[in-house]
Image (spheres, helix red, strand yellow):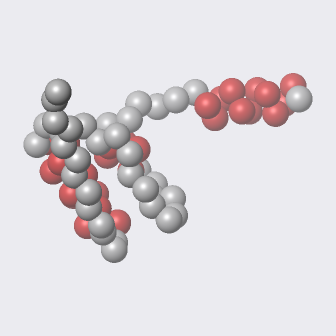
Amino acid sequence: MAKKKFVVGCFDDEAVLFPAVKKVRTAGYKIHDVYTPFAVHGLDHAMGLRETSLHTAGFIYGITG
């Protein structure tokens, strides 16, 4: 059975979080999730997540609903 490895970090400031996320990604690890008590703008791009069309779908459903 393959061993799974996890990395956990705790950061107090988003100015420290962004460089840490970039270093982890350049080291070759894939970031699956980041939990924050508030929205951190730009974190999805730093994690390498692709853009979704959820906002467009929500707008269309809101207009027609």
Q: Residue at x 50, y 65 (%)?
A: 37
Is residue 52 depicted above or below 34 in this figure?
above
Q: Position of residue 13 (x, y in %)?
A: 34, 72
Q: Residue at x 65, y 29 (%)?
A: 56
The quadrant of the picture occupied by the N terminus is top left
In the orientation shown, which residue stands out farthest toward the right?
Answer: 65
Q: In which image quadrant can residue 15 be found? A: bottom left
Tell me if I can see residue 7 in this picture.
yes
In the orientation shown, which residue stands out farthest toward the left?
Answer: 27
Q: In which image quadrant can residue 32 be found? A: top left
Q: Position of residue 52 (x, y in %)?
A: 52, 29
Q: In the drawing, does residue 57 fall left or right of residue 25? A: right
Is residue 41 depicted above or below 25 in this figure?
below
Q: Position of residue 23 (x, y in %)?
A: 15, 50
Tell me if I can see residue 15 in this picture.
no
Q: Position of residue 48 (x, y in %)?
A: 32, 37
Q: Residue at x 20, y 38 (%)?
A: 4
